[in-house]
Image (cartoon, rainbow, N blue to C red):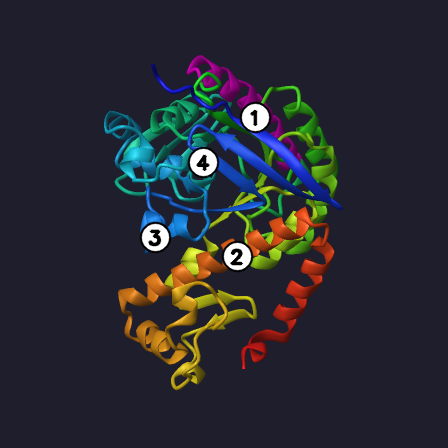
Amino acid sequence: MAAETKAFSFELLNTDGMARRGRITTPHGTVETPAFMPVGTQGTVKAMYPGQVRDLGAEVVLGNTYHLMLRPGAERVARLGGLHTFMNWPHTILTDSGGFQVMSLAQLRKLDEEGVRFQSHVDGQKYHLTPERSVEIQGLLGSDIQMQLDECIKLPAEPDDVKRAMELSVRWAERSRRQFEDMNGPAKGQGLYGIVQGGDVPDLRLKSVEALLQIPFEGYSVGGLAVGEPQEVMLKMLEVTTPAMAADKPRYLMGVGTPDDLLESVKRGIDQFDCVMPTRAGRHGLAYTRFGKVNLKNARHAEDPRPLDAQSACEAANTYSRAYLHHLVRTGEALASMLLTWNNLAYYQTLMAGMRAAIENGSFEDFYQETKANWARGDIAAL
């Protein structure tokens, strides 16, 4: 007898102010929230083994629909057993819709009511991505959490353009939902998230939330706030948006962000995050620690025998000297990317675990203030 498929669900376990402690259940396990999801764009978290990523505490990773549809192709991944098998990640996977990458990477794109036509940045091949095709691709990949196709415009933008994109995204949300149900996503225990748009216009954000709440999504995302706007704009939009969102559904802030972004956004009621920042920074010689950022390219580290953080549980942080890491970065060794990515993802997961524990015991504000104080003191605190 086949094992029963676990249905997608979300349980709100505790709150502390607006900060929320919850648990998402998917067919491939549970995700404790607030959660940071490492980005595995092309079926891999760059410079990391899958087991390493899981050992750091990550319970979900993100795959990218745009990149995977180009290479190796969603149909091929499906024939090979789905993305979980393909990338050796038997835990929860979230896939984005591909819309952001189409807008930012594709060549000669043309958007209309039906979808978006574009040429691949890889080989120039022409594609047509519609809300239906985006959900179909995600279904072929077999991801546990899927995203509607939306139009994500860069800020600043004219209010009329923001309004048009938001309204189009709502119409695409309805089509995405129909396709998700046609592919039996709910029966497979999967979830589909709607995406709140509206740029930096509070009224449009609220109208987007109101419209999306009429569609039975398993979760709701806040999109269009990792596109170059100042942090204060992002936080203002969250303060407007999250109180209007469903309290019994997970809230996902897409493409965010720095450790400070995560701390501030959890304080404003966000449950899920993803960002390339910790992995990309690691490949460029930048380490995140509880004392702030450490740029290992700087010559001042050349004879520094200290590790990044002797108290960290991560071997990359507590074992290797800054002098050695500096040497690896300066000589372009692959090990530099591996160790600094390892360190960065470890710090992000430690930060999220600290926030979860603080929300559980009602001390989030203390945790918030202490974390901010450590960052403000800077690396001198490690001396």
Viewer-proximal residue among 167 and 359: 359
Which badge, 3 or 4, is on the more N-terminal residue?
3
Q: Secondary structure at mark 3?
A: loop
For marks 1 and 4, give the CA distance.
13 Å
Q: Secondary structure at mark 2?
A: helix
- Is residue 272 part of the magenta span, yes or no? no
How many residues crowd around disc 1 within 10 Å: few (fewer than 14), some, or many (20 or more)? many
On the image, the x and y values in percent for residue 15 come to 71, 42
Q: Which residue is mark 3?
A: 46
Q: Which residue is mark 4?
A: 94
Tell me the mark number nearer the camera, choosing from 3 and 2: 2
Q: Which residue is mark 2?
A: 350
Residue shown at 43%/53% (left/top)? 56
On the image, the x and y values in percent for residue 199 come to 64, 41
Q: Secondary structure at mark 1?
A: loop
Question: In this picture, which residue range is highlighted in magenta?
Answer: 160-184
The quadrant where residue 207 appears: top right
Which badge, 2 or 1, is on the more N-terminal residue?
1
Q: Secondary structure at mark 4?
A: strand
How many residues crowd around disc 3 within 10 Å: few (fewer than 14), some, or many (20 or more)? many
For marks 2 and 1, give the CA distance.
27 Å
Q: Which residue is mark 1?
A: 218
Kind of residue at badge 4: Leu
